Amino acid sequence: MLPRPRAHRAFGVVRLGVTVLLAVHVFISAWLVATVEGTYTEGKPAPTEAHSLVAIDKDQTMIDVEIKRATSFFFYTLERDADATVPVSDSESNSNASTSNTSSDAVDDNEGGRDTSSSQDREWLELGRQSVSVALVFMVLSEAMMFTGLRWRHHLRTLGFLSATVAFAVVFPACYMLELTGGLGDDEDAAVSNTPGANLETVTFVHTNASSDASVTWLGFELEADFSGYDLGLVAPENRTAVAEQVPEPGSKDASSYIAFESSFNVQLGKNLDSLLVLPVMWYLMPALPVGQSTKGFAGDEEE
């Protein structure tokens, strides 16, 4: 291992300059990138593919959606009966109706509250942005404190670096997930509901199989999910009860209602965020002057 260089007063200027440059570089880059890849592997919608990209920076959230080989999916949505559902018992039906009425009443009583909910969702992401901004400023200030004679300045510098790391790796992604789970605004909800295939809930499918697998990636995580089942919307009305009770025979007309879908959800921190890892290396290669010497202006160089 290479020996640690001797402390020098010029190192402080270099360290502060690099810290500022890295903070600005990270601040203006994308903080969070999420990609969603979905493919129909079997059934009438196959081989339609859906690709979406979400990039979040200090100012805005950018979303790009692309659908490839959409012809089969287009004809699939035209052919299927969107009103087809799994037959349910009277008790379940009454329970669902009661729940629906209760939800409807709650919406009617809080017509003015939708904007508040949407505002709260936006505030979660804004809170995450503010936490990152404050952490970056604290990181720069903690490096500037190395010019002072503060006894605990090294600990403050470490705390500033850890604060920025936690803000990017934990706080900001958590705020983004809280925004997603907190509900959508009126316009976003309508857009999602009117998207072809967005309302294909499992209640319209029978004999379903679903599986998922999560894994950790560099600066993020990935979730892979598979879903398959028989779509009652592709089954003749007189045969839906039979299909719901028993899996169709292979090769039969009702067996063509089988659909399989594979998807992957990948969330990663911005690719430029790992540049912050340069700072601990720089601290070792450019040590600061001891506390006593840092208060003597530009005194002679001595090893820390």
Image (cartoon, rainbow, N blue to C red):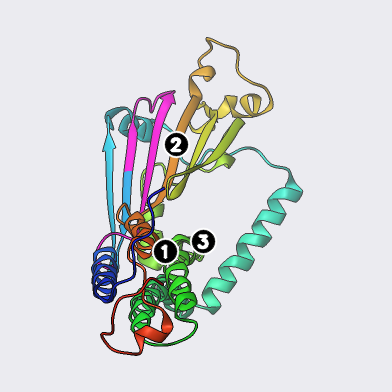
The Cα atoms of the two marked residues, 2 and 3, are separated by 19 Å
Taking the spot 62% from the left edge, 65% from the top edge, the residue there is: 101
Q: Which picture quadrant has residue 116? A: bottom left
User: For the residue marked with disc 2, what is the amino acid?
Assistant: Ser
The stretch in magenta equals 27-51
- Residue 276 relative to residue 111: left or right: left
Q: How many marks?
A: 3
Which mark sits nearer the N-terminus, 2 or 3? 3
Q: Is residue 125 magenta?
A: no
Which mark sits nearer the N-terminus, 2 or 1? 1
Q: Quadrant of the C terminus?
A: bottom left
The percent coordinates of residue 173 (x first, y second) are 45, 61
Q: Badge 1 local density, few (<14 within 10 Å), some, or many (20+)?
A: many
Taking the spot 32% from the left edge, 57% from the top edge, the residue there is: 275
- Residue 105 relative to residue 80: left or right: right
Q: Can you tell which of label 3 and label 1 is closer to the viewer? A: 1
The percent coordinates of residue 242 (x first, y second) are 65, 24
Q: Which picture quadrant has residue 188? A: bottom left
Q: Which residue is mark 3?
A: 181
The Cα atoms of the two marked residues, 2 and 1, are separated by 26 Å
Q: Which mark is residue 82?
A: none
Q: Which residue is mark 1?
A: 168
- Residue 231 relative to residue 89: left or right: left
Q: Which residue is mark 2?
A: 263
Q: Secondary structure at mark 1?
A: helix
Residue with the most extreme bottom position: 296
Q: Is residue 30 magenta?
A: yes
Q: Closest to the observer: 190 or 212?
A: 212
User: For the residue marked with disc 3, what is the amino acid?
Assistant: Thr
User: For the residue marked with disc 1, what is the amino acid?
Assistant: Phe
- Residue 16 relative to residue 188: left or right: left
